[in-house]
Amino acid sequence: MSKKPTKKPQWVIEKEQAKKAGAGETVWLFGLHAVRDALMNPSREKLRLIVTLNAKNKLEEAISAAGIEPEVVDPRSFKAPIDPGSVHQGAALEVKPLNWGSLAENCIGAEVPRVILLDRVTDPHNVGAILRSAEVLGASAVIGTRHHSAPETGALAKTASGALERQPYLRMRNLSDTIVELQNMGFLVLGLDGEADETIEQALEGRKDRPVALVLGAEGPGLRQKTKETVDQLVKIDFAGGFGSLNVSNAAAIALYASRERS
C-alpha cells in the first residue's frame, strides 16, 4: 500500500512560488545614463537592448563592452515596455535584478561602515536619490524590505543616476530582524525621529569610530512603533528654523553626512 504524499505547508508553497517568480523577474531600465552604467556593469545580466540610432551612437563603447546586439528602432516607433511618459532618451535595457549577497557580506569590511535602512519608503524617486547620496558619502549599503519598499525599477535607476549599479541595495524580509542582526555585528542603530531628544551629533559624541546604521521612515508616518522599540536610540536632525521637515532623501543625505567620522 503506497503512502499518501505529505501535503506541503502553505508557507513552503508560498516561498517556492516567490522564488520561482523572482527567477523570472526582469527590469526595464531607461535613459542614457542608467542604461550605460548597466551595460558597463559585469555583474548585471543583460537580456535585451532597444535603442534609436542616435542613442546607439552615444552608447557605442558601452554596447561593445557588454557584447550585446542592440535592436535599433525608429524614434517614432520606440515600443519598449516602459511607461509612455518615461524620458527614455532613445534607450531601454531589459535586465535581471542585481544580487548583492547577504547582509554580512555588504555591511562588514569597511573601516568605519555606515548603513541606511528604510522603513516603508516606497517612492522609487526617493530611494533612487538615497542610493545616489549613499554612494557619494561612502555608505556600505542601503537596506529596505521585500514588501513595502521600492523595488528595482527604471524610474529608481534613472533617479539614482548610475548608483544602482554600484551601491548595494538589499531588500530584507523583516526590518526589525535586520536591525537586530546589525546590532549583533556591532552596529549602533539610530532611528530618525523629529521628536527625539538628541541630535545625531550628540548621540555619536565620542562614538563616530563605531559602525553606524541610520533608520529612516516614510514621510508622514515616519518609523513604525516596532522599529522605534528595536533601534538603540532615536535621534533627530537639528533644524535651524521652526519648519522642521525634510524630504526623506534629503534627510538621509544629511544624517549620513552628520554620522561620518571627519578629521
Image (spheres, rainbow, N blue to C red):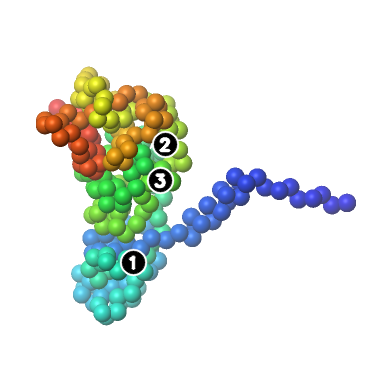
Q: Residue at x 21, y 21 (%)?
A: 202
Mark 2 and mark 1: span between their CA atoms? Answer: 30 Å
* Image marks 3 and 1: residues in contact by CB distance under 8 Å: no
Indicate which disc, 2 or 1, sits on the residue closer to the N terminus.
1
Instruction: Look at the numbered disc 2 and give the secondary structure of its residue.
Output: helix
Q: What is the three-letter code of the residue carrying label 2?
A: Leu
Query: Badge 3 is on which residue?
Result: 148
Query: Badge 2 is on which residue?
Result: 175
Q: Nearer the viewer, mark 2 or mark 3?
A: 3
Asked whether 197 or 115 is in front, the reply is 197
The image shows residue 6 at horizontal and vertical percentages of 74, 47
Q: What is the three-letter code of the residue carrying label 3?
A: His
Estimate how packed mark 2 is, as few (under 14), some (14 to 19) or many (20 or more) residues with alpha carbons within 10 Å: many
Q: What is the three-letter code of the residue carrying label 1?
A: Ile
The image shows residue 263 at horizontal and vertical percentages of 14, 27
The answer to which image quadrant residue 254 occupies is: top left
Figure disc tally: 3
* Image marks 2 and 1: residues in contact by CB distance under 8 Å: no
Asked whether 153 or 134 is in front, the reply is 153
Report the side of 1 relative to 66 (left or right): right
**Residue 82, numbered label:** 1
Q: Residue at x 18, y 34 (%)?
A: 244
